[in-house]
Amino acid sequence: MTNDPAIEILLERSFPRTTRALLDEYATPAYQGFQLEAWVFDDEAERQATEAAFNAAGISARLRSAYKPLVHFFLEEFSWASLQSLVIEYPVLANAPRRFLLEAYPLAGLLPQGVSLRWEGIETTAIAKPIHYRVQVERSSGSQETYLVEAPNRHHQDHVGEAQFSPCGWLRLTSPQGDVSATIVETDYEALFQAAMATLSSTPWQPASPYFEELNFTVHLPSSDRRLAWDDEHISLAEALHEELYFSTLEYFQHRAGLALGDRSIQPGQIVPEVSTQGESAYLKASLRPLDTFQAQRDQVELGSAQQAIGTDQIKQLLAALGGQSLYATTRAGRVLEARYVEGSDRAVIISAGQHANETSGVVGALRAAQALSEQPQAHYVISPLENPDGYALQSRLVATQPRHMHHAARYTAFGNDLQSQPLGQPFEHAIREQAFATSGAGLHVNLHGYPAHEWTRPLNGYVPRGFEMWTIPKGFFLILRHQPGWETAAEQLVEAVTHQLAQVPGLVEFNAAQIALFETHAGALTFPMLNGFPYLISEDADQLTPLMLITEYPDETLTGEAFVQAHAAQMATVVAAYNAFQTLALTG
């Protein structure tokens, strides 16, 4: 309990760990000889310890993961020895036909080399018992096996009144006489989330937004993350809960304001779930706090080999070294964001990064590109490498305790909105773009972004992130080109030129091919066109400032080390390629 008068506590509560609650209720003489099966949101170590405690009490128990049950089956119950082929039947829902294939991600990437895998979709209607996967196995000896892997889900209405079918806790008891009883169990994981949502609806918010400075969810969830033997993938209930709390809170305020779900203009304030894996039971404290104005310091690094997000002091120094005219805007928390206008005889280009501040490779890539362009005497550009300093400060705060998590709470500004949705003419983050365009008259804006480098889920609301279905699993380095009316031909020429140059970056095409292959196994055929090994999308946008906007999407969230170096090298290469190609386009717009 805090005594800080600046902090208003809305809720503070602990939740009995479901595994311990099951032991308290069923590890008794009355249930000796029973078989107990339970699906809970907890890690393998806790589930195995609970099984051992049940067995010591004379009850045969099996505790499985309610989250990604098929992947956990292969990790915990299946023998990989002499495996030759798999045929896996998966449930197909009418409104989400590939959802259970996505829940099986990244199984196809975990299989031993040479093992064949075939998926078969089975149409599934609403039923009261757990739906299941059917796994047909063939060993190199010729022997065959079949397994049913259950995936308990429940039908429910979510926090904005929409129907969902979501993973849930489940309990099945079989008596010594063979009598079976089965029921949904509300786990500690689900109860904590529901308590957070109930707190939102019971709090008397002020009439006008923003409703708060920081809405903080401090969560202890004693369930360890599990790294997987594929790329950056891991299984993390803590990370999934951060995503649920953050986006569900945004959706609550969107719905409350009568806006469409996903409307990025909503300004509730800064939403900060801080989910740790400490403690012995689940714990939630929801509180209202003042804006955090602290700025974490990072050591200076050599930019070209930076292995993680760089510090704001270094960003300022690198900008100053480029020279040119300074442009400024201010954030809600009072942080200053700076851009530099370097005038030359070329066609002007705006280079920006950090709009979504948990996408950090673009910040380094933009600065590296500006350094490269500054060696050209005719270079003409605006460099705005960190458009969302409040989000960037939050990202630094969150990765200090959870360095492998995506932290989408750092995505938007301290107002809670996407800076691109801010009204024109205000002094906040979007003002830097307005100044950049007014000063340079640029015809091209290269806007560097990223997306999750591993699977992104919301397991308590239908599993697939609502509004971001396209980004739930990595699919390589992706380009989006938006153009004003009449600029379609220039957009097509620009994408052709940029992808041609990107194909020369060592390893980048191969990186894309590997990610796209696994994406297509679990999410279906990539529906976007490809050029020179790169997926892309071209669309018209009459409202953007510049005639052309090239948006990069590199799967960078959570990357560190050499993988981060490769990410910002690709971002830099894109900027340089786009800048040079733009100088040669036949512009008729």
Image (cartoon, rainbow, N blue to C red):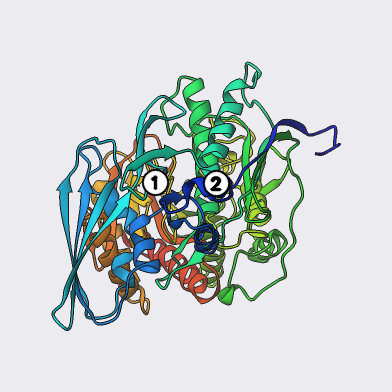
Q: In which quarter of the image is the C terminus?
A: top left
**Quadrant housing residue 233:** bottom left
Q: Which amino acid does label 1 sit on?
A: Leu
Instruction: Give whichever of 422, 402 is nearer the camera.
Output: 402
Provide the residue designation for mark 1: 173
Res. 589 in view:
no
Label 2: how many Cα within 10 Å (few below 14, some 14–19, many 20+): many
- Pointer 1 local density, CA inside 10 Å: few below 14, some 14–19, many at least 20: some
- Whether residue 87 is visible: yes
Percent of width and height locating residue 42: 51, 54
Percent of width and height locating residue 165: 34, 37
Q: Which amino acid does label 2 sit on?
A: Thr
| Mark 1–mark 2 CB contact (< 8 Å) | no
Q: How far apart are marks 1 and 2 (CA)?
A: 16 Å
Decide which of 583, 283 is in the foreground and name it: 283
Instruction: Look at the numbered disc 2 and give the secondary structure of its residue.
Output: helix
Q: Where is residue 492 in the image (x, y as percent from the top left)?
A: 25, 54
Q: Nearer the viewer, mark 1 or mark 2?
A: 1
Question: Residue at 57% of width from left, 30% of height from top?
Answer: 267
Q: In the drawing, what numbered circle is on residue 114?
A: none
Q: How many marks?
A: 2
Determine which residue is flagged by label 2. Answer: 18
Location of residue 226 with respect to 200 vertically, above or below: below
Q: In this view, does 50 lie to the left or right of 499?
A: right
Image height check: is 485 above or below 536? Answer: above
